[in-house]
Image (cartoon, rainbow, N blue to C red):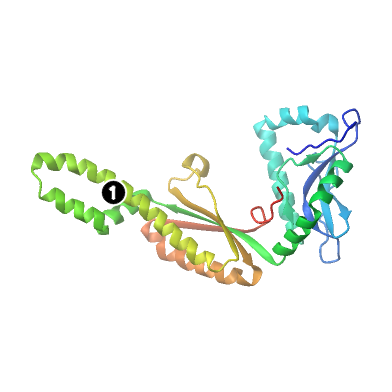
């Protein structure tokens, strides 16, 4: 949560300002959708700062002050609902505007606090909005059926084949011990294969993008899938390059599906990764 305060503000009851994101100044081509704010009562509206606008709503400090907000964010149901609201609002805003999206629960103590922050970062915000104009963010996730990858590796990997030949020349007693080590070697080589395969897919798609970022992979508790995530990355594309990017992705998706590799591309998204204000 971002809740800066100026001197003497603690005793006031001014409305809090919830910031969704920064967009270019209003024009006929970028109307603001009609949205309700985080509290489902207030309206979402623009605050003009000359070349840029802040998209905000007002919140009651008695309901959304720091202590109350801490209680609310400890409620998993409330947190999920409001985080989803924040994301959906950004998606609606993104339909007609390039947007610098703010993190969920970016809240300012009053209008003056927001103005101070905007003015401090205004030049950088203008540069970012120019950078992301006519561009789209897409996300790639690669999953694999681990057993199929191990089976494939065990059938063609040179290191595995050499180990099998070495074991075949051993005494029966020694073979038993070495076969257990062979299983560990297959696991290691399968992990290398997952990384090498994913990097090759990524490199091919990255060649069609203007910027990329490799993200943390998720475990099965998060993905709720039976296959294993082995890659997670994001791409910034010129809008003119999106069709070629998706065509290249679909070709790879179809080619490798039967071998146990499952790929997903989602987008376009607001520029969560390429339009960050620290």
Q: Give the percent coordinates (x, y) of residue 44.
A: 83, 48
Q: Is residue 100 visible?
A: yes
| Quarter residue 48 falls in | bottom right
In the picture, measured across the screen, residue 261 lies left or right of residue 74, that is: left
In the picture, measured across the screen, residue 272 lies left or right of residue 116, that is: left
Query: Total marks drawn?
Result: 1
In the picture, measured across the screen, residue 8 lies left or right of residue 180, that is: right
Which one is in front, 227 or 216?
Answer: 216
Q: Residue at x 70, y 32 (%)?
A: 73
User: On the rendered image, what quadrant is the N terminus found in?
Assistant: top right
Instruction: Give the structural element (helix, strand or loop) at label 1.
Output: helix
Residue 209 against residue 40 in the figure, above or below = below
Answer few, some or many: residues within 10 Å of disc 1's Cα (few below 14, many 20 plus, some between 14 and 19). many
Label 1 sits on residue: 186
Q: Give the percent coordinates (x, y) of residue 68.
A: 77, 28
Residue 66 against residue 264 in the figure, above or below = above
Residue sitting at the far left: 171
Q: Is residue 98 visible?
A: no
Q: Residue at x 52, y 47 (%)?
A: 216
Which one is in front, 137 or 49?
Answer: 49
Which one is in front, 55 or 39?
Answer: 55
Q: Residue at x 45, y 65 (%)?
A: 252
In the picture, measured across the screen, residue 55 lies left or right of residue 190, that is: right
Q: Give the percent coordinates (x, y) of residue 272.
A: 66, 52
Q: Residue at x 64, y 72 (%)?
A: 240
Q: Give the percent coordinates (x, y) of residue 32.
A: 82, 57
């Amino acid at each position: 949560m971002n809740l800066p305060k100026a001197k003497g503000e603690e005793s006031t009851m001014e409305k809090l300002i919830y910031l969704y994101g920064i967009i270019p100044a209003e024009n006929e081509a970028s109307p603001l959708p009609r949205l309700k704010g985080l509290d489902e009562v207030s309206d979402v509206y623009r605050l003009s700062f000359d070349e840029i606008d802040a998209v905000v709503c007002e919140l009651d400090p008695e309901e959304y002050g720091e202590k109350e907000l801490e209680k609310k964010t400890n409620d998993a149901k409330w947190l999920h609902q409001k985080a989803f609201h924040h994301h959906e609002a950004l998606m609606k805003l993104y339909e007609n505007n390039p947007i610098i999206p703010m993190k969920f629960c970016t809240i300012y103590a009053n209008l003056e606090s927001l103005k101070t922050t905007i003015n401090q970062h205004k030049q950088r915000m203008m540069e970012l909005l120019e950078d992301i104009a006519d561009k789209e963010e897409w996300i790639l996730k690669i999953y694999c059926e681990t057993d199929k990858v191990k089976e494939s590796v065990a059938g063609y990997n040179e290191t595995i084949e050499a180990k099998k030949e070495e074991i075949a020349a051993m005494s029966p007693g020694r073979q038993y011990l070495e076969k257990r080590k062979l299983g560990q070697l297959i696991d290691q080589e399968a992990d290398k294969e997952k990384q090498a395969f994913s990097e090759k897919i990524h490199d091919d798609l990255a060649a069609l993008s203007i910027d990329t970022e490799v993200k943390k992979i998720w475990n099965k508790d998060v993905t709720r899938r039976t296959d294993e995530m082995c890659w997670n990355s994001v791409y910034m594309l010129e809008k003119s390059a999106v069709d070629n990017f998706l065509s290249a992705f679909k070709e790879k998706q179809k080619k490798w599906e039967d071998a146990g590799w499952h790929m997903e591309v989602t987008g376009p998204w607001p520029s969560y990764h390429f339009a960050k204000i620290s």
